[in-house]
């Protein structure tokens, strides 16, 4: 398929360009996000003080905003950095962790969408439904169990929200859907153990940010970020099960798997269809 040649090109561009990925992210997963970017071949920077975010994002290749451990101190930093990135045409990724769980998260996500144009928004089904103005039973970072397998619903939701926000909408779950305008890619990679380690969603957003930092196609960059996490989850699970290890080792094995990812591995493992 032609898409694999395009994905190969983007993956190799990361190694060649070493994009600097500026994060304003949460302190639960900040170390994992930094390490996953390094493993892929990018360069992470974690700067969230409003006195420096505009200067920092000005030299970055992409910006990742994650509201996982939201606090009033960093909300203004997110807006300042986002506006500066928009001004300089620097790609921005939003990870609306737990939006809908509290009024602060929901109001902040709305504020960010009103002030910043995001290239990619990645979340689980519950989070994306909240951003679309639909009711959803959000419990922290859990997915809405009742609707997680409704592929047609995900496609419709993703494409409609994509047109409204002019953003790639990546909905991750048992089956991932990555929508932009009228085109949706479905990815069936990954392993259930990914849900047993905190931060895999955050790491996925950082991978997307790294691929967008190459300034290649944002839809395919998002596809490759989600695909890389899914494939790495499968490879990590195999590595730990072969040695009778558990979730702690699985977390490290994810980073190992990303650090050794190649276009050939992507092609071998990828379960991707266009819908």
Image (cartoon, rainbow, N blue to C red):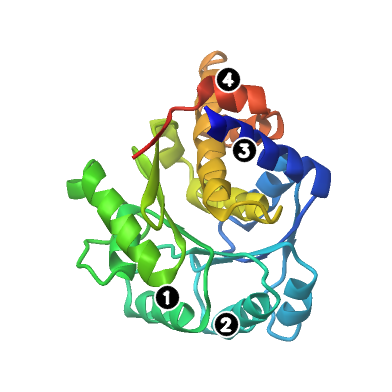
User: Mark 4 or 3 closer to N-term?
Assistant: 3
Q: Which mark is residue 159?
A: none
User: Mark 1 or 2 closer to N-term?
Assistant: 2
Mark 3 vs mark 2, foreground winner is 3
Question: Which residue is located at x 35 percent, y 76 percent?
Answer: 106
The quarter of the image holding the C terminus is top left
Residue 113 shown left or right of residue 214 in the figure: left
User: Mark 2 or 4 closer to N-term?
Assistant: 2
Tell me if I can see residue 71 in this picture. yes
User: Mark 1 or 3 closer to N-term?
Assistant: 3
Secondary-structure class at tag 4: helix
Mark 4 vs mark 3, foreground winner is 3
Mark 1 is surrounded, within 10 Å at the Cα level, by few (under 14), some (14 to 19) or many (20 or more) other residues, namely many
Residue corresponding to mark 2 = 79
Residue corresponding to mark 3 = 6
Secondary-structure class at tag 1: helix
In the image, residue 161 above or below residue 242: below
Residue corresponding to mark 4 = 239
């Amino acid at each position: 398929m032609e898409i694999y040649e395009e994905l190969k090109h983007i993956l190799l561009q990361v190694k060649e360009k070493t994009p600097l990925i500026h994060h304003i992210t949460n302190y639960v997963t900040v170390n994992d996000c930094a390490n996953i970017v390094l493993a892929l071949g990018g360069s992470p920077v974690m700067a969230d003080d409003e006195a420096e975010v505009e200067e920092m994002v000005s030299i970055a290749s992409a910006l990742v905003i994650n509201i996982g451990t939201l606090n009033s101190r960093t909300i203004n930093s997110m807006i300042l950095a986002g506006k500066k990135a928009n001004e300089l045409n620097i790609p921005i990724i939003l990870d609306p962790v737990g939006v809908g769980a509290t009024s602060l998260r929901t109001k902040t996500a709305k504020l960010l969408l009103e002030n910043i144009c995001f290239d990619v928004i990645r979340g689980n089904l519950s989070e994306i439904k909240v951003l679309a103005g639909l009711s959803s039973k959000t419990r922290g970072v859990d997915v809405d169990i009742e609707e997680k397998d409704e592929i047609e619903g995900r496609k419709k939701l993703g494409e409609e929200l994509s047109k409204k926000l002019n953003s790639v909408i990546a909905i991750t779950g048992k089956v991932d859907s990555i929508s932009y305008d009228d085109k949706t890619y479905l990815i069936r990679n990954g392993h259930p153990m990914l849900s047993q380690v905190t931060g895999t969603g955050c790491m996925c957003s950082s991978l997307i940010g790294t691929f967008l930092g190459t300034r290649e196609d944002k839809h395919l960059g998002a596809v490759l970020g989600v695909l890389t996490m899914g494939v790495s989850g499968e490879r990590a699970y195999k590595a730990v099960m072969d040695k009778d290890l558990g979730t702690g080792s699985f977390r490290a094995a994810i980073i190992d798997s990303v650090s050794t990812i190649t276009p050939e591995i992507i092609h071998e493992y990828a379960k991707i269809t266009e819908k």
